[in-house]
Amino acid sequence: MSRTLPALLSAMVVAIAFGGAAQAQRPTFETTKVDGTDTVYIFRYQNHQSMFVVTPAGVVVTDPIGHARPQAVRTYIDEIRKITQAPIRYVIYSHQHFDHIAGGKPFKDLGATFVAHRRARERLEAIKYEDAVIPDEVVDERRVISLGGTQIELTFVGRNHSDNSLVMRLPKEKVLFAVDFIPLQAVSSFAFHDGYPVEWDESLKKVLAMDWDKLIPGHPFAGGLGTKKHVEELLAYMTELSAEVKKAAQAGKCWEDAEKEVRLPKYAHWANYERGIASNIRRYCGYWGRGF
Ligand SMILES: [Zn+2]
């Protein structure tokens, strides 16, 4: 059960950071079609987002986003049914964290095949969390799902925020869905996770090398839709912070002094900056200062 509490904490941090007053006016949920596509939709429920793809042959759903709120999944299905009566064929998990993938049983009951990275299934089998459907099929490096004239490419781009994140790309529509490892203009608190610094940067470079225009993130930062510029900014932030903490570690300042002293003011306007950067410094201190 050691991963359960960190996953919960991370969900809470995101909820606190991104549930501020500016968003209090928003409706609880919202379904929007991605501009420039006929098939790609974003379902947002409170502070989580999930992509779904509608084809004449069926619907591909991604994260159920139903952790501790079964009404979110009922709403998700109702929203799909307003658009199409085609069968829901697949549910694809972005990574194994419960705040994104729990609650999918109603999709299972409708006959969907569940797909995830192999390590996500291994983790879920080990944890045995009762509200997480165990994936039927797994991906190691890459798989393309073709349905009703639409292709969805699933790629493992390396370890980052988790060790089992799948990036989902629609080559024709040039849309990418990536969850939690590419926050838009926000600092995620990754000391709480089994985050993989430095390797994370490599996965961002792989994402940048792919052909796409629009990024759907798992949380509605920066308006809920991103571009390559957001990924470049995040990569710059992580590279700069890593270099600063490496210097601090070599000067013997890890942990507390580094967490207090190291700052990157040009990112201070990002959501969750103060809380997030301290947690990021802790993780980099582990990497550069302790060999973790
Ligand atoms: Zn996560």
Image (cartoon, rainbow, N blue to C red):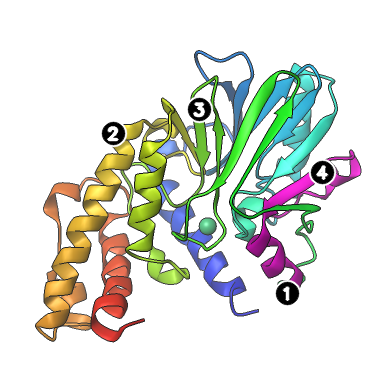
x, y percent for residue 185 = 31, 43
- For the point 77% across and 47% down, the residue is 114
- Number of callouts in the render? 4
Residue under circle 2? 229
Q: In this view, does 46 lie to the left or right of 210?
A: right
Sequence-wise, the earlier of marks 3 and 2 is 3
Q: Is residue 38 left or right of residue 241?
A: right
Q: Say the numbered circle drawn on residue 175.
A: 3
Task: Using the image, determine if residue 192 lies above or below residue 203.
Answer: below
Sequence-wise, the earlier of marks 3 and 4 is 4
- For the point 31% across and 63% down, the residue is 275
x, y percent for residue 184 = 36, 41
Callout 2: helix, strand or loop?
helix
* Crowd band around label 3 with a 10 angstrom C-alpha radius: few (<14), some (14–19), many (20+): many
x, y percent for residue 11 = 52, 59
Q: In this view, does 181 lie to the left or right of 153?
A: left
Please, what is the three-letter code of the amino acid marked with disc 4? Answer: Thr
